[in-house]
Image (tube, rainbow, N blue to C red):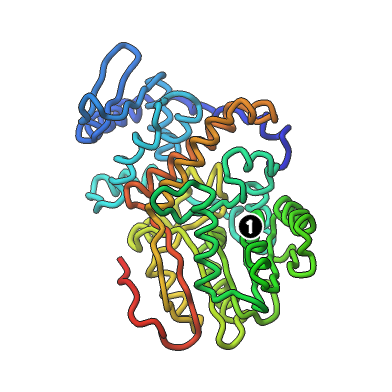
Amino acid sequence: MTTTAETTAWSPPELPRPAPVREWLIEKMFRFGVRTMPITAALPGGERFGGGGSTAPVMRIERPGAFFRRLAVCGPIGFSESYVAGEWTSSDPAAVLVPFAERLTKPVNRPMAVFRRWADQRVPASERNTVEGAKENVRRHYDLPSEFFALFLDESMTYSAALFEPGADLHSAQLRKIDAVLDQARVGEGSRVLEIGSGWGALALRAAERGAEVTTATISAEQRRFVAQLVDAAGLAGRVRVLAHDYRELEGGYDAVVSVEMIEAVGMEYWPTYFSALERLLAPGGHVVLQTITMSHDRMLATKDVHTWIQKYVFPGGQVLSVRAVEEQAHQAGLTITARRSLGDSYARTLRCWRDRLYANRDEAMALGFGGTFLRTWEYYLAYAEAGFRAAHLDAWQFRLSRGCPTDGPTRPTE
């Protein structure tokens, strides 16, 4: 996905071959499940069912035959593919998805556990985050033209959870988040700062404006190009180095090591390597600040080998940690969490802002060469993630890590 020519070539997911028995069974299960959920499913002939009242979000199943076939044959991935294919629609897909996401926070009964094992797909070996594999996985997501990201991100081009306060808009909330990261890391005049995962450059520039000497590293060719141009335009080339390095290739010692929502691209297999790199790159007396999306530990373990729609179409190689996993990996690497902050509520709002902005700029996106299937994929991805945070299936945390024992007293208990 490196050119607009590739994005315009996206086609709806191919409809699988019929499976009449499975389709009949899955329709029965779907109808039964939706009757207990606060949504309304609407069929073309006028039939409506579900546990929601007159104000409940409506899931319009436009092509029932195709929807139930895809769900029966492809499992959970098929449910999402069906939206992208236009087989079901909603004026507010995030609201429809919240009750489904809430189901993921509850214990699974035995029949449903058996069904999930049958329906879930396995993570392909091609998505392993080796040094070369990680570059390919990142290329497939981040090496879209920066003009596309500009359609839904704020002016700072920050692509991670904002930190809202009452009355704040998206841009001010993103700057507040960046300042919170830099404050936690004690970044100031003369600080040697390493950023693992450059994003689109806002944090590196903000740190340099504080008088820090910044090294920012990315394996995305598009992001490296964009950030290098941004640094030159700001006249900060003497303070900011932009490296095309994997975290495993970095060297040196830094007063502050910061990494904002990059660890989700590392993969469980390489978490020990990543946390060891954080410890190795940290100068004595320094601090690490890590911002990451999380889920419950039980759910993380249950899905660690499952190939999800997000991985297949948006974030290949992606894997979310739990708070417990962060604690365990940090401890094994010789690091201690000395402060933490939850951003889950802010992330739900951030995603809604992004989705609204992308929808408002849909015509401009089409003019840039991004086709309807591609845009429906991204609209669904943003709604899918928003629902996860609204249902508390997902959370996001900022952690400060240091060597040795905690200095700030006890931190908030884990789930």
Regarding mark 1 in the picture, which secondary structure is present there? helix
Compared to residue 412, the image places residue 318 above or below, namely above
Residue 297: image location, x then y, percent: 35, 63
Question: Residue 266 or 372: which is nearer the viewer?
Answer: 372
Q: Quadrant of the C terminus?
A: bottom left
Residue furthest to the front: 167
Looking at the picture, does residue 386 appear above or below residue 64? below
| Place of residue 371 in the rendered image (x, y in percent of width and height, measured from the top left) | 63, 27
User: Given the image, on which type of amino acid does mark 1 rest?
Assistant: Ala
Toward the top, the furthest residue is 45
Q: Is residue 265 left or right of residue 251?
A: left
Q: Residue at x 64, y 27 (%)?
A: 366
Q: Residue at coordinates 72% horizontally, 50% vertically from top-left?
A: 222
Which image quadrant is residue 67 in? Answer: top left
User: In the figure, residue 373 lies in which quadrant?
Assistant: top right
- Sort mark 1 into few (<14), some (14-19) or many (20+) by Cα contacts within 10 Å: many
Is 137 on the left or on the right of 15, as rendered? right
**Measured from the top left, where is residue 256 in percent x and y?**
59, 76
Identify the residue at image location x=41%, y=58%: 343
The total of numbered circles placed on residues is: 1
| Observer-nearest of 196 and 119 | 196
Residue bearing the label numbered 1: 202
Left or right placement of residue 387 versus residue 280 in this view: left
37 vs 127: above or below: above
* In-front residue for pair 13/294: 294
From the viewer's perspective, tell me whether residue 342 is left or right of residue 148. Answer: left
Residue nearest the viewer, comparing 337 with 303: 337
Q: Position of residue 249 (x, y in %)?
A: 70, 72
Report the quarter where the N terminus lies: top right
Identified at 54% across, 64% down, the residue is 179
